[in-house]
Image: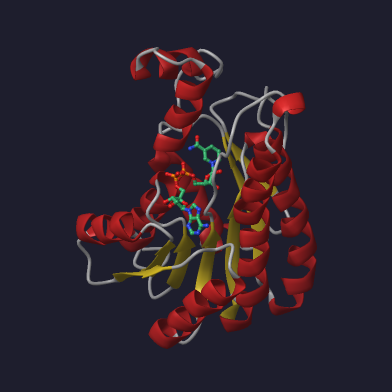
Amino acid sequence: MKLSGKKAVITGGAGNIGYAAAERFLAEGAQVLLVDRDELALHEAVEALASGQVTAWAADVTSSASVQEYVQEAARLFGKVDIFFNNAGIEGPSARIESFPEDGFDQVMAVNVKGVFLGMKYLPPIMNDGGSVIISSSIAGLMGSGGFVAYTASKHAVIGIMRDTAIDLAPRRIRVNTVHPGFVESAMLLRILRTLRPGVADAELLQGFAAQTKLGRCIKPGEIASMVSFLASDDSLMATGQTFVVDAGTLL
Ligand SMILES: NC(=O)c1ccc[n+]([C@@H]2O[C@H](COP(=O)([O-])OP(=O)(O)OC[C@H]3O[C@@H](n4cnc5c(N)ncnc54)[C@H](O)[C@@H]3O)[C@@H](O)[C@H]2O)c1
């Protein structure tokens, strides 16, 4: 078990990818604190994970006070943290640039950029030297798609946060990397697809996206968790400041 004895914090821990990462971390021997703003989903996630090694804490990553509270809870539970999956994110609205709502832009930046920044500011001080931080970006951090200016900008921005903090934290051997999922079979992807093509059945929507991948299908959340767990573990000990794409060959 390659994460045996490690202590992990996952933001967006009640969502598809956060939950899959929690499952993987637990299977690899870690203790996990799930952080999410959705209390009901958190409760359901803890029940479903059915492990004595997982607990949850409700927090809003856009609020400095709330972030400092989840960090305090992690310190109370674990003392020191080894793995920080800085993952909470929202897709926000979809509209062409001329009609893109300003408040929607601000909201996406608050969660996807400020939330990641606040996590980087407050959690590493309670990490063990030699720990690992993984930030959720997206293939939208490496390309544009049209109609998603806020999401695309936010996922590019966290690459900057990753590169800068990887340098700041290197003296403590804390590694910082981004993971870039492509089309993941998830509530978030389905919400996006339903907006783009209202009235079309979910299976057909996913099939359309699967056709855009060279490997011929959408990705399962557990397949993102595999990369996250690799980056969390000593198997990636000398990788820092890097972008790790898991997109089934979409960007080729
Ligand atoms: N699903 C995909 O296809 C996909 C692709 C590329 C990147 N991503 C990225 O992966 C990450 C996880 O996505 P997912 O598919 O699990 O989405 P999801 O919607 O299932 O999960 C996101 C979680 O973040 C939580 N959250 C949102 N705002 C929050 C806030 N202010 N404070 C605390 N928690 C908050 C939500 O409650 C939710 O549980 C996101 O950053 C997303 O942008 C997802």
Question: Residue 14: x, y in percent?
Answer: 37, 54
Q: Is residue 40 above or below residue 188?
A: below
- Residue 121 percent location from the top left of the image: 68, 73
Residue shown at 46% from the left, 36% from the top: 188
Looking at the image, which is closer to me, 16 or 246?
16
Q: Position of residue 227 (x, y in %)?
A: 51, 47
Does the rendering let one see residue 54? yes
Locate the C terminus by quadrant.
Answer: top right
**Residue at image x 45%, y 69%?**
8
Q: Is residue 170 visible?
A: no
Give the camera-side residue of 135 and 198.
198
Q: Quadrant of residue 245?
A: top right
What is the quadrant of the N terminus in the image? bottom left
Position in image of residue 134 (x %, y %): 58, 58
Q: Is residue 107 left or right of residue 203?
A: right
Going by the image, does 169 lie left or right of 249? right
Which of the 4 quarters of the picture holds residue 144? top right
Q: Is residue 162 above or below residue 144?
A: below
Is residue 83 toward the left or the right of residue 205 in the image?
Answer: right
Q: Is residue 139 above or below residue 203?
A: below
Give the residue at x 51% y 20%. Answer: 215
